[in-house]
Amino acid sequence: MSEPVWRFKGPTKLEYLVKAGAGTVEFLEGILQKKLIGKRCPGCELVYMPPRGSCPVCVLEMTESVEVGQRGTVTTFSVIRFPFEGQVLTPPYACAHVLLDGADVPLIHVVGGDVEDVRMGMRVEAVWAEELAPTLASVRYFMPVDEPDTPYADFEAYV
Amino acid sequence: MHRPVHIAGFAQLPAVRDDGGREEAEVVRVVTTDALADAGIARSDVGFVCSGSNDYVMGRAFSFVMAVDGIGAWPPVRESHVEMDGAWALYEAFIRLQHGDVDVALVYGFGKSSLGSVDQVRTLELDPYTLAPLGIDPHALAALQARALLDSGKATERDFAEVVARARAASQGNPNVPTADAIDVDAILAAPYRRTPLRHHDCAVQTDGAAAIVLTVGGSGPRIAGLEHRIDAHQPGARDLTVSPSTRLAGEAAGATNIDVAELHAPWSHQEIILAQALGLGEGTSINPSGGALAADTPMVSGLTRIGEAAMAIRSGAKRALGHATSGPLLQHNMVCVLEAS
């Protein structure tokens, strides 16, 4: 009688073809030209960044593309103090909601510079990777710029 | 006593082999807008929403959350989801309407075959110890069932081919499935096997698509006279594969008698024979006038589409129609929805 089998390896792998969809393709093609392209809802006129195909409030197709600014305001943030695989910056650094000028939805990204300086209302600017790829990671991080802070009342609605 | 639930609206996106990467939210927005328009009901009057989809099919975690953008999620809505065919979302919505506080429910299912390998996903839904490691694909598994049916003497390969020929002919009139040439029984039987004893034609066309149904308490749409589901053992080796006890029990509980039109969710031709036998469908019943799931099988959508097509049959004059949905390997889990004219 053969030995009983107590364990076996069962490797599983599923492969998928990623298709970004029309709205996202435009965003990713913009990235390759160092442009940040969002979409404006024809109903509520809010600009979504990154873009979406449908406005979740108005249930309308987003038809108008809008290039938003590369500078924006930190609306809220959290400090990352531990290391993990794939980090672009060395801890400690801040993960922040960046409300880009002209957009109505904050982008989640990381902020460089002295972490002790990061604050709500701080102005930041996109820093691009040297080699651009169709991914938001082509914006490596946002760096503080020498501009007066945005008053809280001006971004309170986005917090 | 059930509150009477009616199918007030139905819509489907034409099933295609590859939709070119349409976003989930866009697909859902279009199909739910169409279903609500068909029902003549405003989105703001919907009291409950339930969807069916599967992340392994879509290759994206929480894909149903992305899709919620397509139904209008603000102000907040009562929303739920099943990781199953949209037919089971319809079941949840039917139960939800029995609570008494909500009178309109919106149900949708969406899925794609073009993003990954649905066949590999189906393999991985098998028993992880004894079956999945063998790598048996769903067509090979279906072929074992077809072989058992042949060996039992309950059907012949010509019977399979007749199911295919009828489905092909019926699908000619359905603009929502990919075009396929009509083909006669002898030509089908002359074709090579895909997985013996199943030929290419015996296996469904795998597609991308979506469907949506609007349910109302009361109203003039086809009334849900019975809605039941039953389940068999997961392990195909534990079952007699030539019969479907769960379909028979669901049909009996749902009152599936005197059916004019039956839309059966049979992704392989021989399964239509098993289902028709389990439901006791005879000469008086038109089976799969839409072409059925053989013409277009969209994962997480095909079952809901069968119920929608049954509702359309009532609109076209049938008195009693039946929509069937299946889930799991080899007709493991089966739902029967009996509809009658209001």
Image (cartoon, rainbow, N blue to C red):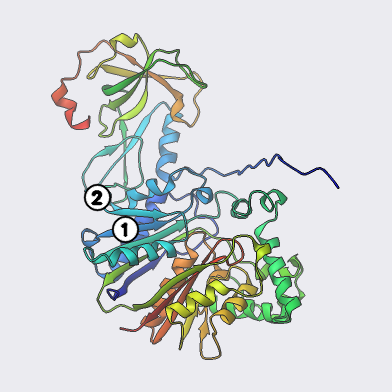
Q: CA distance from mark 2 to mark 1?
A: 17 Å
Where's residue A34, x and y in %? 41, 26
Callout 2 crowding tier (Cα within 10 Å): few <14, some 14–19, many ≥20: some
In the rendered image, the vertical position of residue A95 relative to residue B213, given as above or below: above
Instruction: Using the image, tell me which numbered label, if any, was put on residue A58.
Output: 2
Closer to the camera: disc 2 or disc 1?
1
The residue carrying mark 1 is B49
Q: Are marks 2 and 1 in contact (CB under 8 Å)?
A: no
Q: Quadrant of the N terminus of chain B?
A: bottom left
Front one among B281 and B202:
B281
Question: Looking at the image, which residue is at 70% across and 55% down?
Answer: B136
Task: Please indicate whether residue B109 sits to the left or right of residue A54 in the image.
Answer: right
Which chain's residue wears label 2? A
Question: Looking at the image, which residue is at 63% across and 42% down?
Answer: A13
Residue B177 seen in the current view: no
Q: Amino acid at mark 2?
A: Cys
In the rendered image, the vertical position of residue A57 relative to residue B151, given as above or below: above
